Image: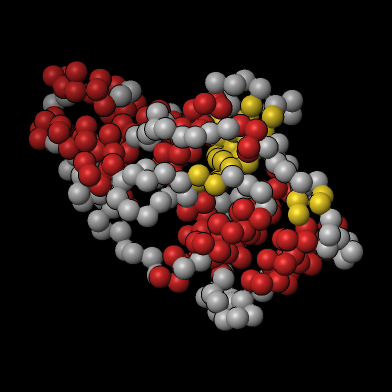
Amino acid sequence: MEDKEKFILIDGSGLVYRGFYAVPPFFKSPKGVQTNAVFGFANILLSLLTTQKPQYIAVAFDKKGPTFRHKEFAEYKATRVKAPQELYDQIPLVKTLVQTLGIPLFETAGFEADDIIAAISKGLSSRNNFQTLIATGDFDLFQLVNKNTAILYPAKGFKLAETMHLEDVIKKYSLTPEQIPDYKGLAGDHSDNIPGVMGIGEKGAKDLLSKYKTLENIYEHIGEITGAMKKKLEAGKESAFMSKHLATLCSDMPVDFDLMQCKVKDLNVKALKELFAEYGFKSLIKRLDDIYGTESMSAQSSLF
């Protein structure tokens, strides 16, 4: 992997959510604006840049409004508890941080950040000279893992300590990445309100996929299955295929992607320190001082 160009794709929406709950809510700017989610996100982002040292980087966000999944299944994510308004209020602040770092930001109406990451990742995975790392805590994105694509998975705090390669995903979940939509087609996904097949469950789904590999192949061999399992599959066939479709990331969505725009740029240290001061991030200003020195206010420096 050392001789490959490294591209980090960041699940912006997911990591903002993580930052919000990882940092106490009393974390505020000098003007009294709540900034705990921004602080958490900034820590994760700086850790990625300093430890991974990517040549390319981009951030994807969900765009407000329904997606094509909501149009196809009105109950999609209907049971999810709405996040506090204090989290949503910080998203523009996070985007300002991303832009100050010179990192391109992607969001598209009707699609989720996961779909954007899938589309970009698909294009990169065909380039054998690239290693793509997806920074996320979202299991849905594990379906993108292949020989050239891995997941940077969050540990406690602000670190993304665990790197999940293809063999790691198979060992941990007893599924190949390609089988994750099939698995959700059978077992469903409570967090996204994807129904799956009633009564199959996680173990039943994995047992079926271990033998038949895909949802389509299970139903092609339904005659081999007996008893209650067969009845459940027959009754839930329509739901199974709809659920698999909902769980499958849309890697063929249109994305206005320019590789060179994602190349890691020199850092405007002065602008970043000013932003950190505005947000009240004294510890992050000190972190920059430790890297560049206290006389770096006007520096345009190579990024970490």
Q: Where 55 sits versus 34, above or below?
A: above
Residue nearest the viewer, comparing 190 with 85: 85
- Using the rendered image of the protein, determine whether residue 247 is visible from the camera's viewpoint: yes
**Residue 201 visible in the snapshot:** no
**Residue drawn at point x = 34 percent, y = 34 percent:** 248
Rendered location of residue 281, percent (x, y): 68, 70
Q: Residue at x 32, y 63 (%)?
A: 81
Counting from the top left corner in percent of width and height, residue 288 is at: 79, 61
Q: Residue 17 in the image: x percent, y percent?
A: 48, 60
Decide which of 261, 234 is in the foreground and name it.
261
**Quarter-wise, where is residue 6 in the image?**
top right
Whether residue 156 sits left or right of residue 276 in the image: it is: left
Q: Quadrant of the N terminus?
A: top right
Q: In the picture shown, does residue 197 fall above or below 223? A: below
Q: Quadrant of residue 284?
A: bottom right
Q: Residue 169 versus residue 67: which sits nearer the camera?
A: 67
Which residue corresponds to the image point at 21% horizontal and 36% vertical from the top-left? 242
| Residue 45 placement (x, y as % from top left) | 64, 53
